[in-house]
Image: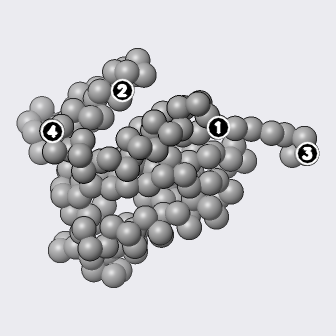
């Protein structure tokens, strides 16, 4: 649309299904490059990306021409397909259902970029669940713990 200007920064977080630690360290950079291509093909700008064996953080300059849910769906579907077709893991790889998305202002970018870069440091003292719940709480987002903690419908942990 002509004369439409936006500046929207989103920090997207999602985990491997069942919190499996199945993102291979030796393929991490390949995964990041692949997801970068998907993001850029949707008219967004990838600003920072980092993953741990069980989850990923992606900071983008968002293009509202596309819905966020479609962009995340495409990232997850295409990267899962790549991982499975290339057999990067034993068994079938899949991402969790859903995701977290958090907005930041331009003045906060350096802080969140450094946060994403320092994932290994953060997770030497904090689990992904603790990190994610902390983010949800900081943004005042209500959530159902059974989805965050990976509980089954019967209430038992996965």
Q: Residues within 10 Å of mark 4 (few under 14, many from 20)?
A: few
Name the disc covering residue 125, or none: 4
**At which x and y percent is residue 96?**
31, 50
Q: Earlier in the sequence, mark 2 or mark 1?
A: 1
Name the disc covering residue 98, or none: none
Q: Judge whether 77 appears above or below 6 on screen.
A: below
Residue that badge 2 annotates: 136
Name the disc covering residue 8, or none: 1
Q: Earlier in the sequence, mark 2 or mark 4?
A: 4
Q: Nearer the viewer, mark 2 or mark 4?
A: 4
Q: Residues within 10 Å of mark 3 (few under 14, many from 20)?
A: few
Foreground pick, 102 / 111: 111
Contact (Cβ within 8 Å) of mark 1 with mark 4: no
Q: Quadrant of the C terminus?
A: top left
Going by the picture, which residue comes out furthest to the left?
156
Q: Judge whether 106 appears above or below 45 on screen.
A: above
Name the disc covering residue 2, or none: 3
Q: Judge whether 98 appears above or below 105 on screen.
A: below
Q: Quadrant of residue 79?
A: bottom left
**At which x and y percent is residue 57?**
39, 48
Q: Earlier in the sequence, mark 3 or mark 4?
A: 3
Determine the CA span between mark 3 and mark 2: 35 Å
Q: At 80% from the left edge and 39% from the top edge, which residue is drawn?
A: 5
Q: Earlier in the sequence, mark 3 or mark 1?
A: 3
Contact (Cβ within 8 Å) of mark 2 with mark 1: no
Q: Secondary structure at mark 3?
A: loop
Foreground pick, 41 / 32: 32
């Amino acid at each position: 649309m002509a004369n439409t200007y936006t500046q929207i920064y989103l920090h997207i977080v999602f985990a491997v299904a069942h919190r499996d630690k199945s993102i291979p360290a030796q393929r991490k950079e390949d995964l990041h490059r692949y997801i970068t291509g998907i993001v850029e093909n949707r008219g967004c700008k990838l600003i920072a990306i980092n993953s741990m064996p069980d989850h990923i953080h992606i900071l983008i300059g968002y293009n509202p021409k596309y819905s966020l849910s479609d962009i995340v769906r495409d990232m997850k579907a295409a990267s899962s397909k790549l991982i499975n077709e290339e057999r990067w893991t034993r068994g079938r790889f899949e991402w969790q259902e859903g995701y977290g998305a958090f907005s930041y202002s331009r003045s906060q970018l350096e802080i969140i970029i450094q946060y994403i870069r320092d994932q290994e440091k953060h997770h030497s003292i904090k689990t992904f669940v603790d990190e994610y719940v902390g983010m949800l709480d900081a943004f005042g987002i209500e959530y159902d713990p059974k989805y965050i903690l990976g509980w089954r419908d019967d209430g038992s942990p996965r």
